[in-house]
Amino acid sequence: MTGRELAKLLEPTVEGLGYELADLEVRLGGKGGLVRVFIDKPEGVGLDDCEKVSLAISALLDVEDPVPGNYDLEVSSPGLDRKLTKPVHFQRFEGETVKVQTRLPIEGRRRFRGTLVSSDDENIVVEVDGESHSLPLKTIDTARLVPVVE
C-alpha cells in the first residue's frame, strides 16, 4: 500500500475525530518500520490529542492490516517547521516565511527561502530578496515553514 493510499484510509478516522491529517511518513523494511502521522487543528495539538488519534488509528490498522511487517506508529503535531503538502496549507500560511525546494531548477535555482506571498490550487508565489518567483505546486519537492525566532 502506498503512502497516498494509506492516507486515504486514515483520513476519515482522523477527520471524524476533529483533526486534519497534515502529513504522513511511512518507512518500512529492515528490523522494523515506522508509520508517522502528523495531525493538526486550528487551536493546536497536544499530547492528549495525539493519544486519542493514536488509539483510533491503531485499531483501524489492526483491522485493515494495510502495512506489511512490524512497524511503530507515531502520532505527532506538525511542529513549528511544519511541512506544507496541500494547497490549503500554503493558503493558510500566506505571509509567513517558507523554505521551498523544487525537483528541477526554476529560474536557474531549486531552493527558495522567502515570504509566501500568495497561492492557489496550482501555484505559489514566494518573494526572495524583493523578487517574486511563481512556483507550480507539482514541481515542489519539499516546502516547510521557517520558525520565527524572537
Image (spheres, helix red, strand yellow):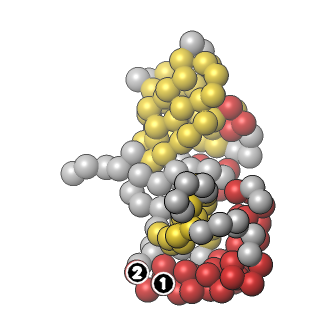
| Residue 79 location, quadrant | bottom left
Left or right: where 46 falls relative to 60: left
What residue is rendered at 77% in x and 66% in y? 8
Establish if 82 lies above or below 45.
above
Q: Residues within 10 Å of mark 1 (few under 14, many from 20)?
A: some
Residue marked by disc 1 = 51
What residue is rendered at 74% in x and 40% in y? 122
Contact check, label 2 and label 1, Cβ < 8 Å: yes
What residue is rendered at 54% in x and 23% in y? 110
Q: Exactly how many numbered labels are in the figure?
A: 2
What residue is rendered at 40% in x and 81% in y? 47
Q: Nearer the viewer, residue 140 or 70?
A: 70
Q: Which mark is residue 111?
A: none
Q: Nearer the viewer, residue 127 or 32?
A: 32
Left or right: where 50 falls relative to 16: left
Establish if 57 lies above or below 72.
below
Q: Position of residue 146 (x, y in %)?
A: 39, 45
Q: For numbered disc 1, what is the local secondary structure?
A: helix
> Identity of the amino acid at label 2?
Leu
Residue marked by disc 2 = 47
Q: Position of residue 98 (x, y in %)?
A: 46, 41
Establish if 96 lies above or below 24.
above
For the N terminus, the quadrant is bottom right
Is residue 17 among what the camera can see? no
| Residue 141 location, quadrant | top right
